[in-house]
Image: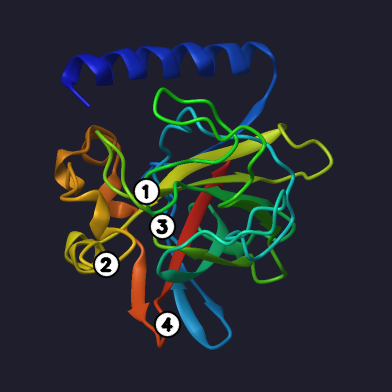
């Protein structure tokens, strides 16, 4: 993303937020220095630092797919190829003095496949309308946690590999209160994964993290997943801290 592209995105985002405010929509906020702390989940101490918000991007589709394993396509039962990734997300409400699990929140994730293709969209390079692979949501438990099974995402021109996520606090009014951002990966791990199939057939990726304008200008270094190697792929986790305004 060039500097001109970024300015255009920033102006569009400001316009969107103005429209949302006029419509009375409540937003969950991120990228603030006011809230921080820790809390315990199943014997583990989790940090509670407010998470940077990032652009939704053009590929969000509100499929309402309530499922932990998002690798399959419900339209035909096929499974998207790629290195398995077990993803655990802990969501906390953070203020100046406290850090609490946010239970009952709807957490959507979506991302491209190993070849850089998203489902259920029409793009200049592909048409996957009607497909629903690599999309789904879970509802946070009493610990504020959700778990997904997916694959390590591929890449497409102009973007480093990432996973989009959206958190909505009231499932009865799905657009009422929400927070949107993206998860990223350590470049060295991505280099290792992309040397294997089916990723390697795409050739060298571009850009790396620091060459991605959204990563560089919108706090991407605070959104890198913690990954642990498993027998079949990786286990990833992230602690999302939200200020609810």
Mark 4 packing: few (<14 Cα in 10 Å), some, or many (20+)?
few
Residue lying at 20% horizontally and 65% vertically, measured from the top left: 195
Mark 1 packing: few (<14 Cα in 10 Å), some, or many (20+)?
some
Q: Between disc 3 and disc 1, whose residue precedes?
A: 3
Tell me the CA gap for discs 1 and 2.
13 Å
Per the image, label 1 sits on a secondary structure element best described as loop
Determine which residue is flagged by label 1.
115
Observer-nearest of 78 and 191 = 78
Determine which residue is flagged by label 3.
49
Instruction: Tell me where residue 238 appears, x and y as whole percent.
Output: 44, 64
Q: Which mark is residue 232?
A: 4
Q: Is residue 207 above or below residue 113?
A: above
Total tally of numbered discs in the picture? 4
Observer-nearest of 32 and 60 = 60
Q: Is residue 47 visible?
A: no
Tell me the CA gap for discs 4 and 2.
12 Å
């Amino acid at each position: 993303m060039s500097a001109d592209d970024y300015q255009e995105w920033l102006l569009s985002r400001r316009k969107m937020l103005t429209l949302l405010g006029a419509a009375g929509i409540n937003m969950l906020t991120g990228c603030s220095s006011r809230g921080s702390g820790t809390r315990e989940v199943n014997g583990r101490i989790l940090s509670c630092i407010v998470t940077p918000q990032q652009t939704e991007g053009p590929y969000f589709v509100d499929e309402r797919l309530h499922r932990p394993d998002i690798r399959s396509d419900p339209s035909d039962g096929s499974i998207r190829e790629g290195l398995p990734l077990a993803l655990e997300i802990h969501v906390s409400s953070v203020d100046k003095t406290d850090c609490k699990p946010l239970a009952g929140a709807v957490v959507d994730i979506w991302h491209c496949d190993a070849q850089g293709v998203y489902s259920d969209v029409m793009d200049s390079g592909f048409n996957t309308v009607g497909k629903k692979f690599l999309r789904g949501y879970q509802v946070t438990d009493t610990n504020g946690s959700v778990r997904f099974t997916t694959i390590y995402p591929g890449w497409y021109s102009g973007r480093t590999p990432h996973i989009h996520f959206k958190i909505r606090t009231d499932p009865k009014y799905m657009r009422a209160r929400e927070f949107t951002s993206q998860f990223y990966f350590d470049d060295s791990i991505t280099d290792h994964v992309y040397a294997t199939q089916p990723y390697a057939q795409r050739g060298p990726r571009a850009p790396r993290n620091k060459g991605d304008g959204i990563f560089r200008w919108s706090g991407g270094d605070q959104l890198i997943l913690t990954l642990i190697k498993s027998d079949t792929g990786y286990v990833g986790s992230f602690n999302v801290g939200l200020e609810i305004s």
